[in-house]
Image (spheres, helix red, strand yellow):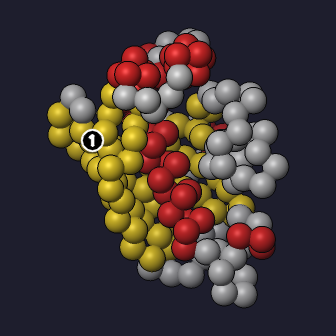
Amino acid sequence: MEIVREELKPVKNFEDQTCFGCGSKNPVGLRMEFLTDDTRLYSFVSVPKTMTGWDSTVHGGILTTILDEMMGWSVIYLLGKIGVTKSITVDFKKPVASENPLMAVGSIQEVVSERKAIVTGEIYNQDSILCVQSTGTFASMTAQAAVRLGVMGTDYMERFLPLLRQKDGPT
């Protein structure tokens, strides 16, 4: 898969986010940033050697985290809703080496209902070879519903609302 990174637009996140996957302020996290063509989400990431399993092969749990983050942010950006993982299936096709550039891709496969989406994720190595792919079922909800269900607090939800609206206009 050939993607020209410079042709993609950035997806905004909190500057002080501490999430393991996407938090720029998490000193031991992946610090994923997201870009989009308004059809899919992309993240260009290199996994440090401290997150390996065998030798220099990235741990499967870390690869699953990358895919889960891609799919969750696909729900956030592409559907404008909070996405909570209900289930995820991951297929490991090729080993992924640490400290090499990777491209992760997330997209909506199907909107099943107002509250359910099927989302896909893929990880490509520096040679554009598909190494890992996933399918997830996500509960999709408004930020207000996420507060009612205890997914996030009211203050967090208020800060998050502009991120849910960025596809359709400036935040």
Q: Is residue 32 visible?
A: no
Closer-to-camera residue (138/120): 138
Q: Looking at the picture, does residue 7 appear above or below residue 94? A: above
Residue at image point 56% right, 81% down? 95
Q: Determine whether, in the image, residue 63 is placed left or right of residue 122.
A: right
Label 1 neighbour load within 10 Å: few <14, some 14-19, many 20+: many
Closer-to-camera residue (156/50): 156
> Residue most toward the left?
113
Q: Is residue 171 visible?
A: yes
Residue at image point 40% right, 17% down? 144
Q: Position of residue 34 (x, y in %)?
A: 60, 40
Residue at image point 21% right, 28% down? 114
Q: Looking at the picture, does residue 166 appear above or below residue 52? A: above
Which image quadrant: the C terminus? top right
Q: Determine whether, in the image, residue 56 is placed left or right of residue 151.
A: right
Q: Position of residue 58 (x, y in %)?
A: 64, 74
Badge 1 marks a residue whose secondary structure is strand
Q: Position of residue 91 (x, y in %)?
A: 39, 73
Q: Which residue is mark 1?
A: 117
Residue at image point 66% right, 49% down? 20
**Number of numbered discs:** 1
> Residue most toward the bottom?
55
Which amino acid lies under the numbered mark 1 shown in the image of this protein?
Ala
